[in-house]
Image: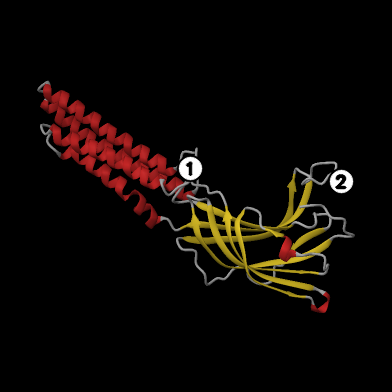
Amino acid sequence: MHSATHPGCDTVRTGVYITSIHDINFRQNEYAIDLWLWMRYQNPALDFYNNLEVPQAKSVTRSFATLDSGGGDRYLLMKLQCVMQDSWHITNFPFDAQTLRFSVENSQFDAKSMVFVVDTVGQAFDPRFTLRGWAIDTLKIVSGVRKYETNFGDVHIARPHMEYSSFKVRVNISRDAFGLFMKLFLGMYMAFLAAYMCFFIHIDNTDSRFSLSVGGLFAVVGNKYIVDASLPETVTFTLVDLLHGITLFFIIITIVGNAINLKLSKQELDGEAIRFNKLMRRGVLITYVLLNAFFIVKAMKGW
């Protein structure tokens, strides 16, 4: 990039028509987008074909480009296929909503010499394409200025500060999550139910009771590793962590309950052991279900 001396300020009327958004990859923090990009301007010095920049793009492929300079205006139409680097908010995964960001800049002229103006005529995306597993909530197109705290090595610029006009597209999407939620957490809930079944086994069968609880514990840990493998690394405590943590805690509670029952049985307090077992059977299930329901609804509502 460099600053250019250019009389006046050129206006570039810019628009997009998105034909596809696909390959949303949480692990790699990326998604792919195919779109038509057009620009209408007058200054022949503007070379968008060679100087178009797509910030945050891992790769940009121009599969088609045409320039029409008739009638005084220059009209450039390009088909772009981009793999975009993005970040995901996974706190409420899989009940998450995401914002996909796409923007373009021109590396020839700064914001004092050239600005983008949004062409709002017509639709901005093909309503026939569907984003599998997601719903498109809103699509917003704006133009603005992007600031760079550098002079890009230009010694003629005293202050290390540059501003370039930016054309931005924001696509807000939300997930149709029920099927994915069941797919991810069914194993965890089955493991909890297996551990919970120990309360229906007679208190004398201590080996069976402990075996179910410990087996459920390892099954939940295994399910947690499988789910984490599809998510990016994060330092935040997500819904996935919370539900698995609650499940592990309640399985530990069942193990502690079995230990108490075993102690009561050894002390020949079978009546007390039976009453305690019934209390645990009701309390564990009710509390576990209520806590899961609360945090799942909270994630769905985005609280």
Q: Position of residue 89 (x, y in %)?
A: 52, 47
Q: Nearer the viewer, residue 235 or 134?
A: 235
Q: Residue at x 80, y 54 (%)?
A: 110
- Which of the two marks, 1 or 2, is nearer to us in this view? 2
Please state if 71 lies on the left or on the right of 265 as rendered. Answer: right
Mark yes or no: residue 118 visible.
Answer: no
Please state if 149 lies on the left or on the right of 135 as rendered. Answer: right
Q: Secondary structure at mark 1?
A: loop
Q: Nearer the viewer, residue 292 or 104?
A: 104
Q: Position of residue 59 (x, y in %)?
A: 60, 58
Q: Secondary structure at mark 2?
A: loop
- In the rendered view, tell whether residue 66 sits above or below residue 159: below
The three-letter code of the residue at mark 2 reads His
Kindly identify which residue carries mark 2: 156
- In the rendered view, tell whether residue 223 sits above or below residue 255: below
Mark yes or no: residue 57 visible.
Answer: yes
Kindly identify which residue carries mark 1: 233
Please state if 176 lies on the left or on the right of 146 as rendered. Answer: left
The three-letter code of the residue at mark 1 reads Glu
